[in-house]
Amino acid sequence: MELRKDPITKSWVLIGDLEASAPGGPTCPYCPGNDVLVGPPIYQLPFKNRSGAIRVFPHPGPLYRIEGKAERRAEGIYDKMRTVGAHEVIVESPDHDSRISIADEHDIADLLSCWAVRIDDLKKDGRFKYVSVFKNQGMVAGQEIKHPHTELTATPFIPRRILYELRASQEYYERKERCVLCDIERQEEQQGTRVVDISGSYLALCPFASRVPYELWIVPRYHHASFEADLLHRGDSTELAGMLRRCLARLEQVTEAYHLVVHTSPNTHARGEVPGYWSTIHDDYHWHIEIMPIARNLMKSYSIKESYYCSTTPETAAAHLKDLPAGREVAQQQSLGFKY
């Protein structure tokens, strides 16, 4: 397995023959008492309000490995490097049938704190330029491990989607001396037509140019570039936990499968040798969470050469989601027929 750079799009691509897959079999290795199947956790965070803990393990079939250096090198006109990084499984709950949409908000707050701690820890390693936290829920979303979990990757490059965001945010700030997501948040709040949920500090919305039906973003109503620094400074993540739970409870009434990605700032310590590298990032970038649903009955939504077609307007999607119940009891009833 190695990383190769496309000389036209400048995106890094993982290329290699198929390696070990996630553990299977009748026994779930992440259920309590089965840790011998996966070894000791890298990190664990006890729940504050009940027994048990969130546990973090190395991924059983990692895309990136922690040992060594990236060793970026040329092959003719091409660039490639080793797949140095980290790939972790964050086991969200001891309960095999749990989901964020039905979990206690204090448990979700602990999970968010765990995400922040792991991002912060891996950003201390100068080899890693970006740390991604993401969740693939449902088989059509690529979920391999059945136990409720999130994944984390630390990479020696910045993913292309994030790089686009960083550059666009920087350009907007250079023109207007304002953060683009702060402007988006204010306008969406004023118009209200694409707002799904709002609290004191957070706004959930269907973005103006949604790529897929029912795409959802959770955006802080205040400015901060770094998810992990923000949450670790605030200490209490219960409000964000409630927003995330309600959004997923609504969304799961539309589809059982989705991708969730935390968009945070890159590791600015990784390129300290470049003068001015992301010099305005604390002013121009704004962390947020993006949720991309996958609905078979709405699969007219697709991407061709990164030109998207979305068969449901964000205004229609927001109105529908806003009208759906968001209580834990509703999501709990739905879980009876939920399939991972």
Image (cartoon, grey):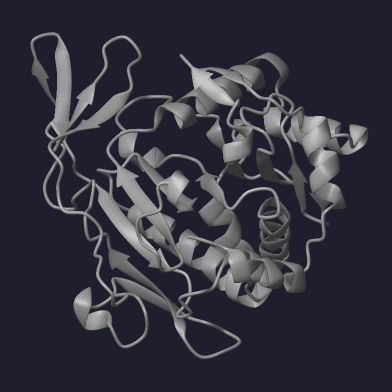
Front residue of 189 and 19 = 19
Q: Residue at x 16, y 53 (%)?
A: 20
Task: Tell me if residue 197 comes above or below residue 285 in the rendering.
Answer: below
Residue 32 percent across, percent down from the top left:
36, 85
Residue 239 percent across, percent down from the top left:
73, 64
Which quarter of the rendering shows the N terminus? top left
Residue farthest to the bottom? 51
Front residue of 291 and 48 = 291
Residue 123 visible, this orientation: no
Q: Residue at x 16, y 37 (%)?
A: 70
- Please state if 274 lies on the left or on the right of 51 as rendered: left
Kindly indicate the quadrant of the structure image that contains residue 23. bottom left
- Please state if 60 lies on the left or on the right of 332 as rendered: left
- Please state if 67 lies on the left or on the right of 238 as rendered: left
- Please state if 43 lies on the left or on the right of 172 as rendered: left
Residue farthest to the left? 75
Residue 97 percent across, percent down from the top left:
51, 74
Front residue of 245 and 120 = 245
Q: Residue at x 58, y 31 (%)?
A: 299
Task: Tell me if residue 122 comes above or below residue 225 in the rendering.
Answer: below
